Amino acid sequence: MAFRPLHDRILVRRVESEEKTKGGIIIPDTAKEKPQEGEVLAVGPGARGEQGQIQPLDVKVGDRILFGKWSGTEIKIDGEDLLIMKESDVMGIIEARAAEKIAA
């Protein structure tokens, strides 16, 4: 199913966190928190300004983002758990180099 967010909303898939800590401790599923990192799957056209002009969004499809723990609305599309949130809920975009350092 194709989904196109409206206005300044974005569709995000959570990126799963590591199963182990840096020290090698395995984290059980019951102790895991929901990841606050995700990949943008779709973006809306942007919010309208006071003069009615559309302000394009800073995030784009494929960006890895950080968002607040309670940000967005959880939905299920084609059996996949996704989030819809406003661009203002996004704290920042993870650049490719930073993402590699986090993964290492």
Image (cartoon, helix red, strand yellow):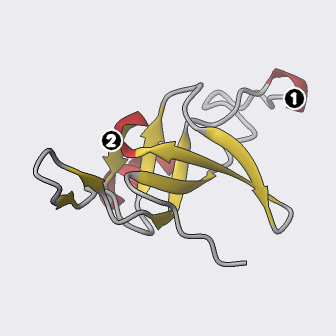
Q: Position of residue 86 (x, y in %)?
A: 44, 43
In this orientation, does residue 39 appear? yes
Q: Position of residue 80 (x, y in %)?
A: 79, 60
Amino acid tagged 1: Pro
How many C-alpha atoms fall within 10 Å of the one at disc 1: few (<14), some, or many (≥20)?
A: few
* Nearer to me, 6 or 83: 6
Q: Where is residue 104 in the image (x, y as percent from the top left)?
A: 49, 49
Left or right, residue 76 beside residue 95: right
Left or right, residue 74 beside residue 47: right
The residue singled out by tag 2 in the image is: 92
Residue lying at the far left in this picture: please name it.
Answer: 51
SS under mark 1: loop
Residue drawn at point x = 53 percent, y = 43 percent: 37
Residue drawn at point x = 58 percent, y = 48 percent: 84
Circle count: 2
In this orientation, does residue 104 appear? no
Q: In this view, does 7 lie above or below 73?
A: below
Q: Residue 28 carries which label?
A: 1
- Image quadrant in which you'd find residue 19: top right
Left or right, residue 57 beside residue 40: left
Name the quarter where the N terminus is drawn. bottom right
SS under mark 2: strand
* Nearer to me, 7 or 68: 7
- Image quadrant in which you'd find residue 4: bottom right
Marks 1/2: CA distance? 28 Å
* Nearer to me, 53 or 26: 53
Amino acid tagged 2: Gly
Residue drawn at point x = 28 percent, y = 57 percent: 57
How many C-alpha atoms fall within 10 Å of the one at disc 2: few (<14), some, or many (≥20)?
A: some
Residue drawn at point x = 51 percent, y = 43 percent: 85
